[in-house]
Amino acid sequence: MSYFRKLYSRGELPHRAKSVYIYLYDRCDDEGKTWPSVKRIAKDLSLSENTVRRAIKDLEKAKLILKEYEYRSNGSCTSNRYYLL
């Protein structure tokens, strides 16, 4: 069975969330984590940054990803880390 079959059959997920999930999956490491910026995802998928943020919220709500906030040593924000569940 295809890895994405469960994703495709989830009718409650909008297509934006499915696209972002596949993007994250394609860029994750062996531990299932990845950390592209919202800006990078938006550019690569030709989506707006707001659309990517909504997709990430959709994926969190569906318990397909876990978002972890990342900070630099000076306390400023950097790209979030995403874990595929």
Image (cartoon, rainbow, N blue to C red):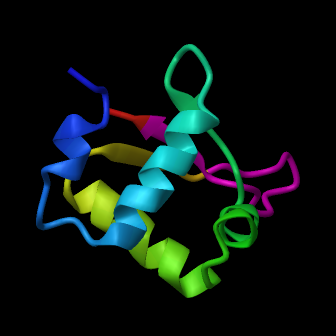
Q: Position of residue 32 (x, y in %)?
A: 49, 25
Taking the image as shown, residue 66 lies to the left or right of residue 24, namely left
The magenta span reads 70-83
Magenta stretch contains residue 75: yes
Q: In this view, does 47 lie above or below 76?
A: below
Quarter holding the C terminus?
A: top left
Q: Where is residue 53 in the image (x, y as percent from the top left)?
A: 50, 74
Quarter holding the N terminus?
A: top left
Residue 63 visible: no
Q: Residue shown at 66%/62% (left/top)?
A: 41
Q: Residue shown at 30%/37% (left/top)?
A: 4
Residue 18 visible: yes
Q: Residue shown at 66%/44% (left/top)?
A: 35
Q: Position of residue 50 (x, y in %)?
A: 54, 85
Q: Residue shown at 76%/57% (left/top)?
A: 78
Residue furthest to the right: 74
